[in-house]
Image (cartoon, rainbow, N blue to C red):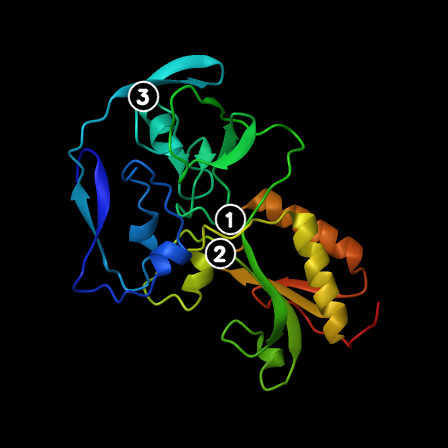
Amino acid sequence: MTGWVRSLRDRKLCRECGFCQNVIVCPATDGCVGCLACYRGCPHQARRLTVDEDKREKITITVDGTPIQVHERITVKKALESIGITFGKYAGNGKIFSPCEVGGCYSCSVIVNGEAKRTCIIPIKEGIEIQTTLPEGSTPLRIIHGPEAHMVGGKATPWWLKGDHYVEVAIWAAGCCYTCPQCQNYHVTYDGRSKPLSPEEAAKLVTSCRRRYDVDRMAISGGEPTLNRKWLIQYFKELGRLNARAQTSIGHIGPTRPKTRS
């Protein structure tokens, strides 16, 4: 499909669940900006793509100090792509990593008018100033669900834990580089509305929950938890500092040992 595209509701498939209003973020104020978050995240695949033939005027923005003209009513990501800045859905592809495209993972953030914003869902506006490289030392963000006590026993559980009644404390990270229609955590994966957390904030919540339930095992799952590398590394460092005698894992992976108190 060429040109501008927009997402329309397929009334035959729509179940009026409200997911696209309450979980998926829609940045549109003056019409669809073509972010397609609702198309990617609808749990019932009740969205269809169509050509958007509405006229778009040119507006002026500033990118890394240079005034640029781009079309109005598109996302920051589309505007940057139109001037040659590349985005990659997988690590190592493109200047800016943009894997989830629904606003959950925050990997595609750039500085817009002095604040970190997600390029995939933020609409372009006249006169905005964009800095495509985040400042050194800036705090990474990500939408997180939980923490809560979680019974180990899923298909990702190591074989040596199978059959044991073992409780861990888990969080789930929003955003994913896939769009599996059978996603069991779709309410997490496609969440672009919840308030994001810093690695330090998430680590403190998980640590507090671990102590409340008196367990020594912590996990992060998703969505896809490994997308925002900077966030994840800082999270593990802070979690390790706060829980020197406990364990951490991604997706329940890791050896077991006797429970300890700290």
Please provide percent x and percent y for residue 48: 20, 52
- Of residues 134 and 93, the one drawn nearer to the viewer in this rendering: 134
**Residue 215: in sight, yes or no?**
no
CA separation, marks 1 and 2? 6 Å
Query: What residue lies at 47% left-to-right and 58% top-to-bottom?
Result: 223
Q: Which residue is mark 3?
A: 70
Q: Is residue 35 left or right of residue 203?
A: left
Q: Which residue is mark 1?
A: 227
Q: Residue furthest front?
A: 30
Q: Residue furthest top?
A: 66
Location of residue 189 (image quadrant): bottom left
- Of residues 110 and 260, the one drawn nearer to the viewer in this rendering: 110
User: How would you rate the neighbour count of disc 2 (Cα within 10 Å): few for under 14, some for 14-19, many for 20 or more?
Assistant: many
Residue 143 higher or lower than 96, as above or below: below
User: How would you rate the neighbour count of disc 1 (Cα within 10 Å): few for under 14, some for 14-19, many for 20 or more?
Assistant: many
CA separation, marks 1 and 3? 29 Å
**Residue 117: in sight, yes or no?**
yes
Name the element at disc 2.
loop
Query: What residue lies at 61% left-to-right and 46% top-to-bottom?
Result: 231
Q: Which residue is mark 2?
A: 224
Please provide percent x and percent y for residue 22: 41, 57
* Residue type at numbered disc 3: Val
